[in-house]
Amino acid sequence: FRLSSLIGHISTCPSLIGQCCQRHPGSVDEFQEELVIRPLHSGDIYASFQFRTLWDTDFLQEGQKVSHYRLFPKSLGQVLSKFSVRELHISFTQGFWRTMQWGQPFIPSPPGAELWVWFHDTVSDVDGNWKELTNVLSGIFCASLNFIDLTNTVQPSASFKPLGLGNATDHRFLRYATLPREIVCTENLTPWKKLLPCGSKAGLAVLLKSEKLFHSSFHSQAVHIRPVCQDEQCTSKAWELRQTLNVVFDLYTAGQGKKEWSLFKMFSRTLTEACPLATSSKVYVDITDNPELFELSPATPLLSQAVVLGDRRTYSVFDLTRAETFGQLRSLNLLLRWKGDGGEMLRPLLHAERYVAGFGLQTGEIHTVIYNNHPYRAFPVLLMDSVPWYLQLYIHTLTVTSKSRDNKPSYIHYQPAKDRHRPHLLEMLIQLPPHSMTEVTVQFERALLKWTEYTPDPNHGFYVGSSVVSALVPSMVAMNTNFTQDQPLFSSFVPVKEESSYFVRVYTEPLLVNLPTPDFSMPYNVICLTCTVVAVGYGSFYNLLTRTFQVDEPSLPLAKRLANLIRRIRGVPLLT
């Protein structure tokens, strides 16, 4: 809110000692929390948390100074204001999302850490702001984002458009980087939970126990900040902070003897109350396959239907703001019990894979395979590859084939790498035929690094970030394009502009590439040999210089020694 409004509001307060103004009457900030539970056909279970904070202030307005924070975290608000950030998206992921087994996630993310930011068009030094921003975010989330520099940062021209207000097309103000080797641990989860208005003390966040979340097949936490409209006519705007956490619990990793899940088995806790600051707190359970696949208890009369990722799904809704949801025990523990084998899941319409081929440590080939599983519809996809500079791409070897025939891309954007300065960037718009497999191949040559540029474990290999495939996939049912505030959070993250298609972003596996590696044990061997030679040579010479020599008289024969012994006893002179 404006500074003048704040001053006027403070002047109306009876006293600033003993009383405080809870919120500005002109400000509209709200907090929503949501948990979606989707039983999977394999017997695993997918849980998706979403926490949304709306704030109707403008960090980027000239002369605007925001000093009062209620629900929006101050640390992130200051970051937006200082670095003139228009949009910020950051994720930390442990594990790889198995699309063919689990389907499409609500919000995808690649393994490791991913960060992409749109800066305001008034920023003059984007690279300087980007470097400072990564260092600040590294401190906020206790991550290794400070390792992001120009050698692993790219400026995509078409793959990452703003998800909020504005139709920015000048990609000079966009920065994208990944750290595929980033390890996600408790030290990243703790500051993430502290950004919530209720922390981990109340509401859905009480389920976020690190020892359970990290003992899973897949775990991903993210923060998304963007400007959004508050109504359909967009007469008022606000900043949206959306914190998401996705986790997949594996049936065998969890040590389950049978296909049966509950909130207590997943998180070691049950729900007892909603966050007091939340205007909405709900738990959704996907019962589209119920009762053929599983049974849900306790039952609820509240049902909701939503079109998610091109499919109409039915959900049981548990409203935590209602006292009757918790029953007499004041505790909610959902139980899902499988009835038998889940059968086969419907194959996702879009899927992608990537791998490295070749032999030796000089050349190789990157293969990216994209599957269109739609039976009769063709659609275009946008493929983005960011390859480190030490893999020198031969772009003239680029081939795209579909159904054993050449498939010429309609758009290609390629930015060659500069050694130790920037990576390769390749973007292509490819038309996928119906029910087809499209393969993209490009050859590369491995570069020789300086000995100081190798990682502490160079024989493990070097990671290459995931490829990104973006597409508008044909929808089986009509998508909902109407803007309503009552939409579930999991179905309203990506704006829908057409009823016939929906936006999907797919990440491939990261690559692990071996580079020519010197024998780092040789310096150790040289040091040992040199020390041995010096010790033997110098030691012998030092002994010769410092040793004291004495004349050693020859000893007497045994007969003379016995005679001298007798003479000594008798007291006569000894023999010589």
Image (tube, rainbow, N blue to C red):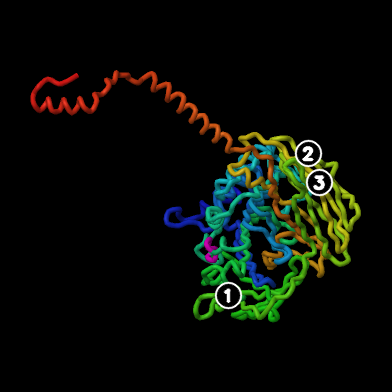
Could you say which quadrant of the image residue 555 lies in? top left
Q: Which numbered disc covers residue 442?
A: 3
Is residue 261 found left or right of 100 in the rendered image?
left
| Left or right relative to 187: residue 471 | right
Q: Are marks 2 and 3 in contact (CB under 8 Å)?
A: no
Residue denoted by label 1: 257
> What crowding class fits label 3: few (fewer than 14 Cα within 10 Å), some (14-19), or many (20 or more)?
some
| Three-letter residue code for mark 1 | Gly
Residue that badge 2 annotates: 416
Quarter of the image containing the C terminus? top left
Look at discs 1 and 2 and give the one toward the viewer.
Answer: 1
Front-lying residue, 498 or 344: 344
User: Going by the image, does 397 lie left or right of 156?
Assistant: right
Please identify the residue farthest to the front as the structure is shown. 559
Q: Quadrant of residue 126?
A: top right
Q: Dot 1: what SS?
A: loop
What is the span of residues highlighted in magenta in the rendered image? 206-211
Q: Residue at x 53, y 61 (%)?
A: 210
| Disc 2 secondary structure class | loop
**Identity, as a three-letter code, of the amino acid under mark 2:** Pro
Name the residue type under label 3. Answer: Val
In whole angstroms, how far apart are the C-alphas of marks 1 and 3?
46 Å
Spatial CA span between label 1 and label 2: 53 Å
